[in-house]
Image: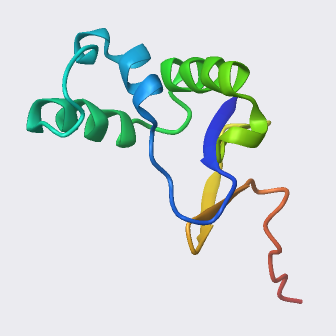
Amino acid sequence: MKVVYNSDYGGYFVPGDVVVDLFPEAAGLDPFTHEYQLFGDAADDMPRHDARLVAAVEAYIAKVGEDDTSLAVADVSGDRYWIEDYDGKETVRTPETIPWVKVK
C-alpha cells in the first residue's frame, strides 16, 4: 500500500494541480472562490492511502520533481499506518517502526 505524506515543515495540503487531476470540474475555476475551495477541501480530506490521491500525487511529483514539492509517497507493508506530525513535517509509522515499550 502507498501513503501520501508531507515531508517538510509547514503542513499537509494538496496543490492545485493535484486537485484538478482528482476533480477535473475544478479546472478553470478561480482558486480563491468558495466553489474551488470545496474541491481543495475534499482533496485534503481524502484518506492518505486512497489510490486516486496516490496516483495524482505521484504524477505531480514526476512533473515538478521531488525537490519542488513537500509531498511524498511512502510504501507501507501491511494494513496499518499512522502519520506522525511535528510542526507540519510528517513521518509515516507502521507497527514495525513504532518504538513500543515492552512490559516485562
Q: Residue furthest left?
A: 34
Up-down relation of residue 60 to residue 9 (above or below): above
Residue at the location (80% across, 36% down)?
77
**Residue 48: image location, x then y, percent:** 52, 39
**Residue 67: image location, x then y, percent:** 77, 41
**Count of picture labels:** 0
Q: Is residue 71 left or right of residue 35?
A: right
**Residue 20: image location, x then y, percent:** 37, 18
Residue at the location (69% across, 40% down)?
68
Q: Residue furthest right?
A: 104
Q: How is the image coloured?
A: rainbow
Identify the image quadrant of residue 83.
bottom right
**Residue 11: image location, x then y, percent:** 51, 60
Q: Nearer the viewer, residue 96 or 23?
A: 23
Q: Quadrant of the C terminus?
A: bottom right
Q: Is residue 84 left or right of residue 33?
A: right
Q: Nearer the viewer, residue 76 or 86?
A: 86
Q: Is residue 71 visible?
A: yes
Q: Is residue 75 visible?
A: no
Q: Quadrant of the N terminus?
A: top right
Identify the image quadrant of residue 26.
top left
Q: Is residue 92 left or right of residue 50?
A: right
Up-down relation of residue 83 to residue 63 (above or below): below
Q: Residue furthest bottom?
A: 104
Identify the image quadrant of residue 39.
top left
Residue at the location (56% across, 66% down)?
88
